[in-house]
Image: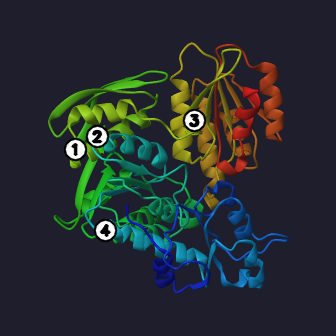
């Protein structure tokens, strides 16, 4: 285990020790007082003040032994008499301090420590889950918890390293320079780009700019080595433009010739099967989740395993036993036998399209799509929501239910294109959707719930489970 002492924190951040033992070893880092455990190190990443007790005081009460806070948050040191055994450090910029400490922690593990960084427009989390499951067949592996993939979550993940032998780190972004900062902290040995779609296109202006932002992941690497989805148009074109030996590039795909490919694909409702061809060697793999996108995830995970010299049988085991992060394509069975596909954590055009296709794979069921707004699309919002509506109209889905300002465009387009006489309804609130579903769900129905996280559509599945 690579420990960080209070003295290290002071030297790394230029902070001030207000109280406590400078030789004390820091515990697990946390930035949310609700997640504090005994012995943790709490870091308040902003300088907001609250009435009554400050967050750092709550952290101490919850068991934290060290708190790192903005220097403006401590006005009266007399209050520390209530916690004589606790350690308090002040810094000028807590967020920067968090990132500096994480950078130092990463360096303690050495440049050869295998950190695998994953980014992409869609599929980051599910790919992370599957890759980590393969990597852990050989190494004790840390992976990003939940959606800890931003300027706070990545440092917190790095700081949670203990005796692991590898780490799989998810990296998200909304703007330029964000991946650049994350990769400089994590310094990956191997990077992955799952695809380039339209997520955050409202912030970045074009898919080409999204590609540029994702490629920032290379900037933190000493030796640039990357895995890409060769079936993605922009990534495939980027590959063709690269000069030999500048970047070591590995590819996976189904449609285009790649290092790892899938043959004899059989897609089922809740699973799939395919023959994985890894540079000439073949093995049959069963994926415990339905949908073609999980075939792509499996190919990517298999390629990681091949690069890390993990035997084929262990790669197969890692893929076949992986578990999805909650709220990502989560299957929930209701009391009356109907099923919910809860995929309401995030949404983009590409993930909507994949989810709709996955819903269509359920044969001999009435299929209901409950869709909400996709966020951060800017001037492209109407066009992309209309594309979803057009796809719904041309699909085998029976009922479309929508709520959200931009989801009106899904409804309009679906009604305009509707030649199969689907039931199409718009609701002002998700509560109205809940009420409609409670009154109309039948046994054997399959209900997809999909929207950007800010729509809080997970509440729909929570209510239906009661």
214 displayed left or right of 396: left
**Quadrant (top left/top right/bottom left/bottom right) for the N terminus:** bottom left
The residue depicted at 52 percent of the width and 80 percent of the height is 22
Of the numbered discs in the image, which one, if any, rests on residue 302? 2
Q: CA distance from mark 2 to mark 4?
A: 22 Å
Dot 2 and dot 1 residues touching (CB under 8 Å): yes
The residue depicted at 33 percent of the width and 53 percent of the height is 166
The residue depicted at 76 percent of the width and 49 percent of the height is 405
Looking at the picture, how far across and down is residue 278, in whole percent?
20, 38
Of the numbered discs in the image, which one, if any, rests on residue 8? none
Which residue bears the numbered disc 1?
A: 306
Which residue bears the numbered disc 3?
A: 391
211 displayed left or right of 90: left
Disc 1, SS: helix
Q: Quadrant of residue 314?
A: top left
Q: Earlier in the sequence, mark 2 or mark 4?
A: 4
Q: Earlier in the sequence, mark 1 or mark 4?
A: 4
Which residue bears the numbered disc 4?
A: 221
């Amino acid at each position: 285990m690579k420990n960080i002492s209070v003295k290290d924190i002071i030297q790394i951040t230029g902070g001030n020790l207000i109280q406590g033992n400078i030789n004390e070893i820091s515990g697990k880092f946390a930035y949310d007082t609700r997640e504090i455990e005994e012995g943790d190190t709490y870091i308040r990443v902003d300088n907001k003040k609250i009435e009554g007790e400050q967050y750092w005081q709550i952290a101490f009460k919850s068991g934290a032994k060290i708190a790192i806070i903005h220097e403006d948050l401590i006005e009266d040191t007399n209050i520390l008499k209530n916690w004589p055994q606790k350690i308090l450090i002040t810094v000028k910029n807590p967020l920067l301090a968090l990132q500096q400490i994480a950078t130092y922690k990463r360096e303690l593990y050495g440049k050869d420590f295998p950190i695998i960084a994953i980014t992409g427009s869609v599929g980051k989390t599910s790919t992370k889950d599957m890759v980590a499951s393969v990597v852990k067949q050989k190494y004790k592996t840390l992976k990003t918890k939940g959606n800890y993939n931003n300027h706070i979550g990545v440092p917190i993940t790095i700081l949670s390293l203990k005796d692991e032998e590898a780490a799989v780190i998810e990296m998200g972004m909304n703007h330029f320079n964000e991946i650049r900062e994350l990769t400089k902290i994590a310094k990956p040995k191997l990077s992955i780009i799952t695809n380039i779609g339209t997520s955050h296109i409202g912030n970045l202006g074009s898919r080409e700019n999204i590609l540029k932002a994702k490629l920032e992941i290379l900037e933190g690497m000493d030796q640039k080595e990357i895995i890409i989805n060769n079936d993605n148009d922009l990534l495939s074109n980027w590959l063709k433009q690269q000069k030999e030996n500048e970047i070591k590039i590995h590819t996976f795909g189904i449609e285009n010739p790649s290092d790892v490919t899938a043959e004899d694909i059989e897609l089922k409702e809740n699973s799939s099967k395919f023959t994985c061809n890894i540079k000439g060697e073949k093995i049959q793999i069963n994926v415990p989740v339905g949908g073609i996108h999980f075939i792509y995830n499996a190919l990517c995970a298999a390629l990681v395993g091949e690069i890390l010299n993990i035997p084929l049988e262990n790669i197969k085991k890692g893929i076949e036993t992986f578990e999805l992060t909650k709220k990502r394509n989560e299957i929930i069975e209701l009391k009356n036998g109907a099923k919910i596909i809860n995929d309401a954590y995030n949404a983009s055009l590409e993930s909507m399209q994949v989810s709709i296709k996955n819903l269509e794979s359920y044969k001999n069921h009435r299929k209901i799509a409950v869709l909400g707004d996709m966020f951060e699309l800017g001037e492209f919002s109407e066009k992309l929501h209309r594309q979803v509506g057009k796809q719904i109209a041309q699909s085998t889905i029976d009922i479309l239910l929508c709520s959200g300002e931009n989801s009106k465009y899904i409804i309009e387009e679906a009604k305009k294109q509707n030649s199969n006489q689907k039931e199409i309804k718009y609701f002002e609130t998700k509560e109205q959707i809940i009420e409609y579903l409670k009154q109309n769900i039948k046994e054997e129905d399959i209900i997809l719930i999909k929207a950007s996280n800010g729509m809080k559509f997970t509440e729909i599945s929570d209510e239906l489970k009661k």
